[in-house]
Amino acid sequence: NIVSEIPLPPPGKYEIQYKGLDPLVRLRQSASNELPQLGITLAELFSSLNIDNALSLFVTVLLEHRVLLVSQRPNRLLKCAEGIINLLFPLKYKALYFPVLPVSLIDILYTPGPCIVGILSKHLPLAKERSIRGMMIFNLDHNACEYWSPF
C-alpha cells in the first residue's frame, strides 16, 4: 500500500514526489504558521452567497452555532463547506462536519452541539423534521439564509 510505505515529510520542510503514478504525486505537510493550500477556490462560496449572507455564515460558524447548507448540487455543497472551513485559518473547526450528508445519516441532526452539515435541497423538509435545536439554514442555490427552530 503506497500510503503506508511512504512517510509524510516534517511540516513545512520537505516535499516527497512519487513518479510511479501518472500524474506525479506530491506529498507535503503545511507548516503550522503557513496559509493553507486551497485545493478549491472561494469563488463558489461567494458566487452562491452575497457578501452579507457569506459574512452571516462566517459569523455563525465562528460563534459555533448549527449550520445547514442546502443545495441541489453536491459539488456546490462541498466547495462552499470547504471554503468556509479554509476561511477560519488559523483556527481549526473541531465540531461535527459533514459537507454532503447522505440521507441515510440524517439523524445526525439530532446531535445537540455545533455543526456544519450540507444536504440536498430535496431532503430539507426531512432535515427540519429531524432537528431538535435551531439552526441557520443557508440555501446556496437561492442566496438565502433563515433561522429555523422546531419550537
Image (cartoon, rainbow, N blue to C red):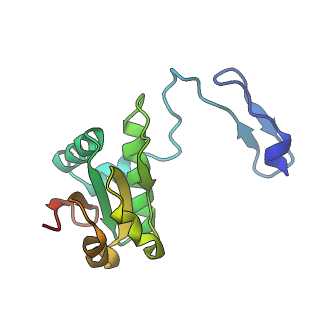
* Image coords of residue 88 (percent x, y): 37, 35
Q: Where, quadrant-wise, is the C terminus in this rendering?
A: bottom left
- Which corner quadrant of the image does residue 15 belong to? top right
60 up-or-down from 145: above or below: above
Q: Which residue appears at 64% of the width and 31% of the height?
A: 29
123 up-or-down from 57: above or below: below
Instruction: Count every numbered label the image shows and give the total.
Output: 0
Name the one closer to the observer, 11 or 17.
11
- Which corner quadrant of the image does residue 135 belong to? bottom left
* Image coords of residue 1 (percent x, y): 85, 52
Name the one closer to the observer, 110 or 88.
110
120 up-or-down from 88: above or below: below
Is 108 left, or right, of 7 in this rendering?
A: left
Name the one closer to the observer, 27 or 106.
106
Is 116 left, or right, of 17 in this rendering?
A: left
- Which corner quadrant of the image does residue 74 belong to? bottom left
Q: Which residue appears at 33% of the width and 79% of the height?
A: 122
Q: Residue lying furthest left in this view?
A: 151
Q: Which residue appears at 23% of the width and 40% of the height?
A: 59
* Image coords of residue 32 (percent x, y): 54, 23
* Image coords of residue 89 (percent x, y): 41, 31
